[in-house]
Image: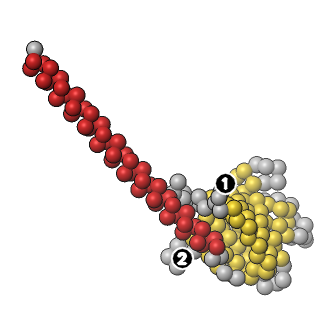
């Protein structure tokens, strides 16, 4: 009888210690994920505040509210200081002589107004983009430090159109598109 009690006691002690070890391992992994997420958020905030970021759009929102995946996925808005590059698919009405199927231009930023809510990690940015032909595009962006964004593009020749996508900090090594989702 004492042998059975001793054996039961050993089994209980082993079970308790193995549970506490797995909880510690899980806690360490969770802390590492949280630290990586915070570092990514700080990098995105720094890029937004320094005006050096890429918005990689993967969805277009039509005027009737229908959301459609953009294919191919090479749709972007790049802001690099005072320079702006836009290449976006377009589906909507055109108010000119020719049908417009895309919004493509390189230009300069005129008016740039940024409002931030740091407690929520959200930036609202209004940009007036001026092309070399003196066309003006008003771009309204909502950027989150979690890596997600939305943008609306307005111009007298097109119907207002909205997009959803991801934010990528601009650096010399990330000019190609990858469909990676931001860290959560």
The residue at the point 82 percent across, 54 percent down is 63
Please provide percent x and percent y for residue 182.
54, 59
133, 173: nearer the viewer: 173
Q: Is residue 128 left or right of residue 167?
A: right
Pointers 1 and 2 in contact (C-beta within 8 Å): no
Nearer mark to the viewer, of 1 and 2? 2
Question: Where's the N terminus, which quadrant?
Answer: top left
Q: In the picture, residue 95 is in which quadrant?
A: bottom right
Q: Residue furthest top?
A: 1
Q: In the picture, residue 133 is in which quadrant?
A: bottom right
The residue at the point 66 percent across, 54 percent down is 69
Question: Is 105 rendered above or below residue 59?
Answer: below
Q: Is residue 138 left or right of residue 79?
A: right
Please provide percent x and percent y for residue 120.
65, 57
Q: How far separated are the C-alphas under marks 1 and 2?
A: 26 Å
Q: Is residue 55 visible?
A: yes
Question: Which disc is residue 171 wearing?
Answer: 2
Question: Which disc is residue 69 wearing?
Answer: 1
133, 130: nearer the viewer: 130
Considering the numbered disc 1 on the image, is that residue within a helix, a strand or a loop?
strand
Q: Is residue 67 left or right of residue 134?
A: left
Q: Nearer the N terminus, badge 1 or badge 2?
A: 1
The residue at the point 59 percent across, 58 percent down is 146
Q: Residue furthest front?
A: 2
């Amino acid at each position: 009888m004492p042998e059975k009690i001793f054996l039961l006691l050993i089994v209980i002690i082993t079970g308790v210690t193995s549970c506490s070890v797995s909880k510690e391992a899980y806690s360490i992994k969770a802390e590492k994920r949280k630290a990586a997420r915070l570092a990514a958020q700080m990098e995105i905030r720094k890029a937004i505040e320094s005006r050096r970021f890429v918005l990689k759009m993967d969805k277009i929102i039509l005027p009737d509210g229908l959301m459609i995946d953009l294919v191919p996925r090479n749709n972007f808005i790049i802001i690099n200081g005072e320079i702006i590059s836009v290449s976006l698919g377009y589906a909507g009405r055109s108010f000119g002589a020719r049908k417009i199927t895309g919004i493509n231009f390189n230009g300069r930023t005129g008016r740039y107004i940024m409002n931030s809510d740091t407690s929520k990690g959200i930036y609202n940015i209004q940009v007036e983009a001026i092309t070399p032909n003196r066309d003006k595009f008003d771009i309204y962006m909502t950027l989150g430090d979690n890596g997600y964004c939305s943008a609306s593009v307005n111009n007298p020749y097109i119907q207002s159109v909205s997009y959803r996508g991801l934010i990528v900090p601009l650096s010399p090594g990330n000019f190609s598109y990858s469909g990676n989702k931001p860290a959560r």
